[in-house]
Image (cartoon, grey):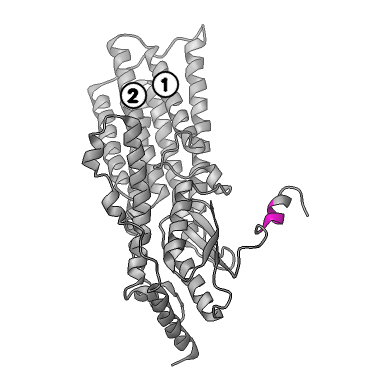
């Protein structure tokens, strides 16, 4: 047995001993959850929102309890990862990622969306050319941007999968939300041009609005586009664990609305013999797309289903609920922790970078302190919303704020 294998066995035994010192949960959180059927019966929206938020916090605490429970069993060895002695089977996480779909399914959704967007773009371009509808032309242009978005997503996925621990020691996961932001900027800028062209067509005095000519075949093809995009929308919504697929789901949702409107406006324009309705429809569709993607960029509605926004790429602080969950993990992890001095977390893309400062007994052995700190660090990284965690060990809480000088000097040099 090599020295490294012997050290790993000692650490595993130490981990088993540490896990037995975990504090018991203060309450059985699952008993405090309000069932969904009871929530639906609450008429007061503010009260219902309060209990929904409470359920979310309870779910976070239950995730911590489940990790602690598993650590007290036979699976605690997975917390110590050594590439030289552990196989892929031994590195299986204790808990499956919450609502995370398999990698092949994510790639299949991206590839099928790409193929569907090419077919739909060609169909709409054909219809726009033969019908003369500017609303259908705007829809075709939007489908072309869908192809561009799939290309950006495909490129970022390939970049992320090409790992280089020396060039990118923490991985390239931030490439994915960055690629989505680039696409959001492109599509918003492009539809501003569509909006300007439609307004110009309506306001020019000497220019007549082009007559729209729709045949039953054209209408059938437009309806088929709506059906295909609707299927893709619901399918991508069912796939969890990828901000790229979430962006595609939102894009398919936009397409469903866009295709319905781009079908209705030309049809109504022909039926009512009012050609100006077609460019008016194009204006409304452009405004809708611009609003949707500006909302994604700025996260104005704070939708949890949206991709992470620019502020998270620039180091936005974690939410209060995030900090509560992290603090609860540190509190429950071991009764050998005298106090929790600092819990700090901020976004580095889709997930959090965590810094926790704990206080241990001054006379505690170095080996025990190290093993406890490393185990707690890995336990943090088992949480769904944590990318990387750092645990700082101390023997008292009397110290200056960490990294304060660096923070104060940002933007001003040294």
Report the front residue among 44 and 130: 44
Residue position marked by numbered label 1 in the rendering: 284
Residue 133 percent location from the top left of the image: 37, 21
Q: What is the magenta range?
A: 403-407
**Residue 117 visible, this orientation:** no
Q: Which residue is outermost to the right?
A: 414
Task: Give residue 146's mark.
Answer: none
Assign the C terminus to one quadrant of the image: bottom right
Which residue appears at 39% of the width and 29% of the height? 139
Specify the quadrant of the image occupied by residue 265.
Answer: top left
Which residue appears at 52% of the width and 21% of the height? 196
Q: Earlier in the sequence, mark 1 or mark 2?
A: 2
Q: Is residue 19 above or below residue 204?
A: below
Label 1 Cα crowd, 10 Å radius (few <14 / some 14-19 / many 20+): some
Contact flag, marks 1 and 2 (Cβ < 8 Å):
yes
Measured in 3D between alpha carbons, the distance from the residue under mark 1 to the one under mark 2, in whole angstroms, is 9 Å
Q: Which residue is outermost to the bottom?
A: 1
Report the front residue among 87 and 201: 87
Which residue appears at 57% of the width and 49% of the height? 315
Residue 246 percent location from the top left of the image: 38, 45
Indicate whether residue 405 is drawn in magenta.
yes
Report the front residue among 319 and 143: 319
Q: Is residue 329 left or right of residue 59?
A: right
Residue position marked by numbered label 2 in the rendering: 261
Q: Is residue 301 left or right of residue 233?
A: right
**Residue 295 visible, this orientation:** yes
Main secondary-structure element of the magenta-colored stretch: helix
Residue 30 percent location from the top left of the image: 28, 53
Specify the quadrant of the image occupied by residue 75.
Answer: bottom left
Report the front residue among 185 and 32: 32
């Amino acid at each position: 047995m090599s020295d490294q294998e012997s050290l790993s066995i000692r650490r595993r035994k130490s981990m088993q001993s540490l896990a037995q010192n975990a504090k018991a949960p203060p309450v059985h959180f699952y008993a405090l959850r309000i069932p969904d059927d009871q929530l639906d019966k609450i008429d007061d929206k503010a009260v219902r929102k309060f209990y929904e938020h409470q359920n979310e916090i309870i779910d976070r605490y239950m995730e911590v309890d489940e990790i602690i429970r598993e650590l007290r069993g036979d699976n605690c060895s997975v917390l110590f990862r050594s590439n030289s002695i552990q196989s892929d089977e031994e590195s299986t996480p204790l808990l499956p990622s919450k609502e995370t779909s398999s990698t092949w399914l994510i790639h299949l959704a991206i590839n099928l969306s790409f193929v569907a967007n090419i077919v739909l773009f060609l169909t709409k371009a054909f219809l726009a050319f033969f019908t003369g509808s500017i609303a259908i032309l705007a829809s075709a242009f939007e489908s072309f941007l869908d192809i561009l978005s799939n290309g950006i997503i495909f490129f970022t996925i390939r970049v992320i999968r090409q790992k280089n621990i020396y060039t990118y020691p923490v991985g390239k996961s931030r490439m994915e939300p960055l690629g989505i932001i680039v696409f959001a900027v492109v599509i918003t800028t492009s539809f501003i041009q569509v909006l300007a062209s439609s307004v110009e067509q309506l306001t020019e005095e000497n220019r007549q609005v082009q007559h729209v000519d729709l045949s039953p075949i054209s209408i059938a093809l437009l309806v088929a586009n709506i059906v295909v995009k609707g299927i893709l929308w619901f399918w991508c919504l069912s796939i969890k664990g990828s901000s790229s697929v979430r962006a595609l789901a939102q894009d398919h949702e936009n397409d469903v609305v866009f295709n319905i409107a781009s079908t209705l406006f030309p049809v109504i324009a022909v039926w009512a013999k009012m050609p100006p309705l077609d460019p008016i429809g194009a204006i409304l569709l452009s405004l809708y797309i611009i609003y949707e993607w500006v909302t994604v960029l700025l996260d104005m509605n704070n939708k949890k289903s949206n991709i992470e926004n620019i502020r998270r790429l620039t180091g936005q602080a974690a939410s209060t609920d995030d900090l509560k969950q992290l603090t609860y993990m540190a509190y429950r992890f071991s009764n050998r922790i005298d106090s929790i001095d600092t819990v700090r977390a901020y976004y580095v893309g889709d997930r959090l970078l965590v810094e926790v400062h704990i206080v241990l007994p001054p006379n505690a052995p170095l080996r025990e302190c190290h093993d406890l700190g490393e185990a707690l660090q890995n336990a943090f990284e088992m949480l769904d919303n944590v990318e990387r965690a750092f645990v700082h060990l101390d023997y008292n809480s009397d110290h200056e704020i960490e990294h304060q000088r660096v923070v104060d000097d940002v933007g001003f040099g040294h």
